[in-house]
Image: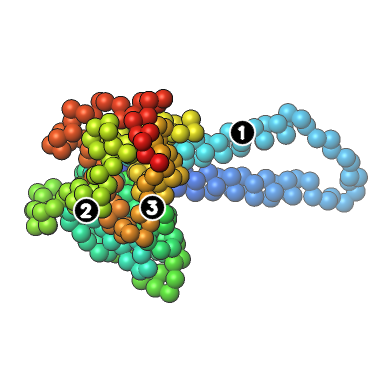
Amino acid sequence: MSKYLPLWPDSASTLSGQVDALYIYLLLVAGVMTTLIFLAVAVLAVKYRRKPGLQAHQIEGSTILEITWSIIPFGVMLTFFIWGAVIYFQERTPPADATEVYVVAKQWMWKVEHIRGQREINELHVPVGQNVKLIMTSQDVIHSFYVPAFRIKQDVLPGRYTTMWFKATKPGVYHLFCAEYCGTMHSGMGGSIVVMEPQEYAQWMANGPAAPLQETGRQLFASLGCATCHRFDTQGRGPNLAGIYNKPVLLDDGRTVTADDNYIRESILNPTAKIVSGFKPVMPTFQGLVSEEQLNALVAYVKSLSQSPATGTAELQNQPSAPPGQPTNTQVQ
Ligand code: CUA
């Protein structure tokens, strides 16, 4: 807001103006309502005060008056809900073109990994004017990723991914806080979001390591032996993973789930939780064998199988990996 009256933190994302507007609206409505109520109390106290020689008499209620003062404030309060819901859904829905960044929280630091392989600790570099989606998880307790200047906050939980997005509108350095009490050094678990001009950002990116996240994932996929079962044809013991990302998957028990980040993650750590129709629960768990960073790389790799024909699997992407009712792996026990 103003540097002379710093009531608001810096406003540096596309959402911050909207959140502020709603907040100001709430304050205004609360102010008007409070004034009206106290005004009515004062006026009525004077008007109906005890006067000498005047006998008090009972005043009956008025249905119309009562309905009016119930319905109108109700309508006014509903606008909070509607406006708040609109902003909430906007905050919860990352644009499809958003750049993905993986965040792993731990006591007491933020570990960031960019899709092109750059890693940072307690810092996140982003370009101005670009949608950025954070895919976050924790390797110990619950933390919360909070950037006041962007007006966004999201809990970061162990054992699953939560996401959040923003589009920075102003270059600068903004505070990152942990907003969930997470132990002794919780208050020190901060960092900074560095918003850069696009060309500056491109330069920064170019200085990073050469191996993109999905490439790290591809190497892990081979070294952990995933590739022996998850083949890019229909002959593997496990489902063909090409093209599955964000697509519906039919399960053994008849349910259909979406193969999103959390599904891929769960399938690595707890493979028997959701068995793909036509397959046997033969995959061992990788719980404890892969770090959160390695998990992110594996997830990024599986996602990349849906995007890049460079993996040599493009021609197979549209083939069903195992049509229900025609299991291709019945020889496996
Ligand atoms: Cu992490 Cu508080």
State the residue at coordinates (53%, 44%): 29
Disc 1 marks which residue? 72
Using the image as rendered, state which of residue 181 and residue 278 is in the foreground. 278
Circle 3 packing at 10 Å, graded few (<14), some (14-19), many (20+), is some
Establish whether ligand 1 lies closer than 8 Å to the Cβ of label 1: no
Ligand 1 image position (quadrant): bottom left
Using the image as rendered, state which of residue 164 and residue 267 is in the foreground. 267
State the residue at coordinates (54%, 48%): 31
In the picture, measured across the screen, residue 288 lies left or right of residue 83, that is left
Quarter where residue 210 is shown: bottom left
Residue 277 showing in the rendered view: yes
Structure colour scheme? rainbow
Using the image as rendered, state which of residue 202 and residue 257 is in the foreground. 257
Disc 2 marks which residue? 223
Hey, what amino acid is under mark 3? Thr
In the picture, measured across the screen, residue 106 lies left or right of residue 274, that is left
Residue 180 percent location from the top left of the image: 44, 62
Work out whether mark 2 precedes mark 1 in sequence or the reverse, and give the earlier one.
1
Mark 1 lies on a secondary structure that is helix
Badge 3 vs badge 2, beta-carbon distance below 8 Å: no
Residue at the far front: name it. 331
Residue 7 showing in the rendered view: no
Query: Can you tell which of label 2 and label 1 is closer to the viewer?
Result: 2
Does residue 282 lie above or below 121 as drawn? above
Mark 2 lies on a secondary structure that is helix
**CA gap, disc 3 and disc 2:** 15 Å
Residue 251 percent location from the top left of the image: 44, 33
Does residue 278 lie above or below 302 as drawn? above
Circle 2 packing at 10 Å, graded few (<14), some (14-19), many (20+), is few
